[in-house]
Amino acid sequence: MLPFVDSRRLTGANLFFAATGATLELAGVPPDEALLSGWRERVARARAQLAWAPTEIVVRRHDGGASLSLAAPLDQLFLATEVNEWALCATLFEREPQRWSGMEAALLVAAIENAAAATEVDPPVLGESAAMARFVRLGAREARADLCALLAETHQHQLPYLLDETLLTLGAGAGGRSYPLATLPLPAAVPWQALHDIPTAIVSGSNGKTTTVRLLAACARERGWCAAYSCTDGVTVGTEVLASGDYSGPAGARRVLRELRTEAAILEVARGGILRRGLAVVRAQVAIVTNISADHFGEYGIDDLDGLAEVKLTLAAVVPPGGLLVLNADDALLCAKAPGLARRFGVAPPLGWFALDADHALLQAHRARGGSTCGVRSGRLLLHHGGDHDLGAVTSMPLSAGGHATYNVANLAGAALTAAALGIAPGVIAAVFARFGAAVADNPGRLMRFDYRGVRVLIDYAHNPDGLRGLLQVASKMRAAQGRLGLLLGHAGNRKDADVQALARVAAEFQPDLVVIKEDEAHLRGRSPGDVPRIIRQELLRLGMMESALPLRASELEAVHYALEWARPGDVLALPVHGTQARTAVLALLSNGAQ
């Protein structure tokens, strides 16, 4: 068994550094200082042998072990994983040769499994002299002088680029051109004057990402651009859906930025994509982090809010000095992390702050220094960016649900500041905000409101405690005087038991009359069917809910049917539906029966 569970190449800024490189997830072996010191020393000797620049080597300890990361040249990423693995394995073998006697054989098996053909395998070795000779061979095989020459010229022309296993794209969107890696042109053959960047925004955070992306795309379209965006629900160019599914990682960003119709790009950037492969983009005019809340703990070495914030704030690495990083002043962790960004990345982009209260102390101080802000005063959304702009009454903005959805008020404030930084005029932003959310198609799956036979039904993506709390706050304010509250409750399987229990506790806070405990069958993610519903039910029973109010259903659609049959006029149903197919079926059902 190998002493690591994951060895991955990183093609852009990630949690550890704003560069390309490789990360290894140590598992089953305590990351003591002697082991880490041996790993560092071997990495340093290998990099010297390969004539790599002495860039940063990073160790990040976490509950599951440690993440070991090193930077490497862009055309040496496969080799970087080999160096990383050898440095760890050779150190372990030197310390305990009997325990790790089968290490070389295990590495060979892994190499054969990962190779396109067994004839391509250069067998891994632990002995240092032989390993160094192997690295030189692998480096020569992987080296791409043509690629490096093109990227150097791209840098000279101040252009962005995209790179994956098969394509290199110079420029972006309507100003980009893609070339197969197998047949790269000479720099002189590239039409440099025809290439250019496009307005690009990247969006991260724990809640509100997709809503913010759609708001920004609507503003960009109103501005007259052909706007393309990628998010949790897919990839859209203009009004055409190119792909459905979760495209909140590098694949979605590349699809948007390689589409020649794209004149403005809005990219959702989720935690998982950053940790697995880094950011696809090398430059974005503006970035926004909506908030930080508990979610996805226990994956890729992220076990707490502090680590999660570090991941989300990786976006700062690709915002240029003339851009803007938009942060939520109501999030204490973002406020605490912001001053350290310059130290972390060497230079930090200008900051913009938003909050529910335009007179938040941080916003006041930031405006006094000439900074950009957005918040609410006397019920009106006020943007300060190149002057003061009144964007309208919050209660008149459909997305706010009459002002009840305070989390969407925050999304509106953050999106307004981000849109302004993209170059969209305040009048255009105000016009979009005055109508966005009135139509069901504006923001699919997010706070969609239906009147179904006298029952108020809310469809939402709420998937963590903060998101569920926001949804239930809106639902509670919408029910009639004698109306009851019912909801669906489930969770994806890649959450810890404690995370599932925390979601159940939020539901119990609102004293619902019915909780239909659902199997999120589209997101089992390693759990056995029935496991997550059992945890939810046990926690709700422990909190005092009656067994009769906790029916179990084996699918999201069955759970929705049960809730609709239970409800009567005046009731409110909060229905977090997460599976794409289930949501499509539910929306069809509600649309056909809506009043």
Image (tube, helix red, strand yellow):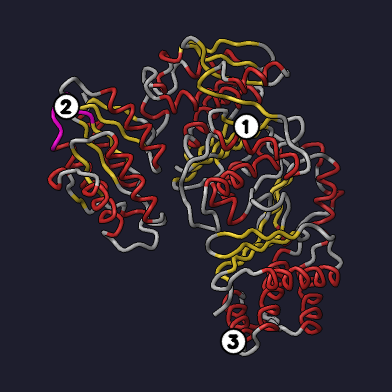
Q: Earlier in the sequence, mark 3 or mark 2?
A: 3
Q: Distance from label 1 to label 2 (Cα)? A: 41 Å
Residue hosting label 2: 453
From this view, report whether residue 401 is shown above or below residue 294: above
> In this rendering, does residue 123 appear at all?
no
From this view, report whether residue 362 is shown above or below residue 132: above
Residue hosting label 1: 264
- The residue tagged with tag 2: helix, strand or loop? loop
Q: Amino acid at mark 3?
A: Arg
Q: Earlier in the sequence, mark 1 or mark 2?
A: 1
Q: Amino acid at mark 1?
A: Ala
Task: Please give left or right for residue 221 compared with residue 542 in the image.
Answer: right
Seen from the viewer's position, the closer of residues 586 and 279 is 279
Q: Amino acid at mark 2?
A: Arg
Q: Quadrant of the C terminus?
A: top left
The residue that appears at 35% across and 44% down in the rendered structure is 503
The residue that appears at 62% across and 78% down in the rendered structure is 111
Task: Please give left or right for residue 224 compared with residue 444 in the image.
Answer: right
Task: Please give left or right for residue 460 compared with residue 284 in the image.
Answer: left
The residue that appears at 27% across and 42% down in the rendered structure is 585
